[in-house]
Amino acid sequence: MTVSSEFLEEMKKALLSEKSRMEMELARFADKTDIPGDYETRFEEIGTDRDDNATEVEQYADNIALEENLEGQLSEVNEALSRIDAGTYGLCVCCGADIEEGRLRAYPAAKECMACLKK
């Protein structure tokens, strides 16, 4: 499959939009570290009584899980943008086959064709 420049531009725009959304979401509760794409969840101090402390710990644990999830998604988006720059976007990283256009439209960061994904 030869990816048209229009399709490539559409996917790049979608990926950049998703990257921006994820970075904004991460900035709500985490700070960037010196490592690109890595964030550290902030511990918000609400108060000093037991209930406040329990709420702080629960919120921190929830935010760590969300941070890890968003960092993983952000990494996939950055990898897809790198594949666009390298000219390999739309090719399966496992077998080299074309990734279906419908799959890329549904998930622009896809790196595997459906056959490899099902393995």
Image (cartoon, helix red, strand yellow):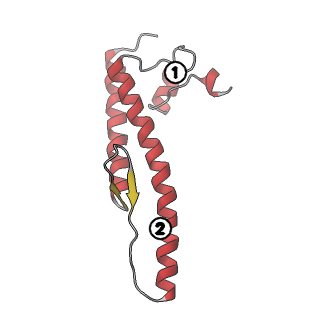
- Figure quadrant of residue 3: top left
Label 1's element? loop
**Residue in the picture at 40% in, 84% down:** 47
**Residue in the picture at 56% in, 20% down:** 94
Q: Position of residue 39 (x, y in %)?
A: 38, 53
Separation (CA) of disc 2 from disc 1: 36 Å
Q: What residue did someone put label 2 on?
A: 60
Relative height, residue 37 to residue 84 (above, below): below
- Figure quadrant of residue 11: top left
Q: Position of residue 78 (x, y in %)?
A: 38, 35
- Figure quadrant of residue 85: top left
Q: Is residue 74 left or right of residue 111?
A: left
Relative height, residue 26 to residue 114 (above, below): below
Relative height, residue 41 to residue 100 (above, below): below
Q: Position of residue 72 (x, y in %)?
A: 47, 43
Where does the C terminus fall, quadrant-wise? top right
Q: Position of residue 76 (x, y in %)?
A: 45, 36
Q: Are marks 2 and 1 in contact (CB under 8 Å)?
A: no
Q: Is residue 85 left or right of residue 80?
A: left
Q: Of callouts 2 and 1, which one flags the residue occurring earlier in the amino acid sequence?
A: 2
Label 2's element? helix
Please rate how many residues cluster around mark 2, counting C-alpha atoms within 10 Å: few if below 14, some from 14 to 19, many from 20.
some
Number of the label disc, if any, that sits on residue 93: 1
> Is 40 or 11 nearer to us in this picture?
40
The amino acid marked with disc number 2 is: Tyr
Number of marks in picture: 2
Please rate how many residues cluster around mark 1, counting C-alpha atoms within 10 Å: few if below 14, some from 14 to 19, many from 20.
some
The amino acid marked with disc number 1 is: Val
**Residue in the picture at 39% in, 23% down:** 83
Q: Residue furthest top?
A: 2
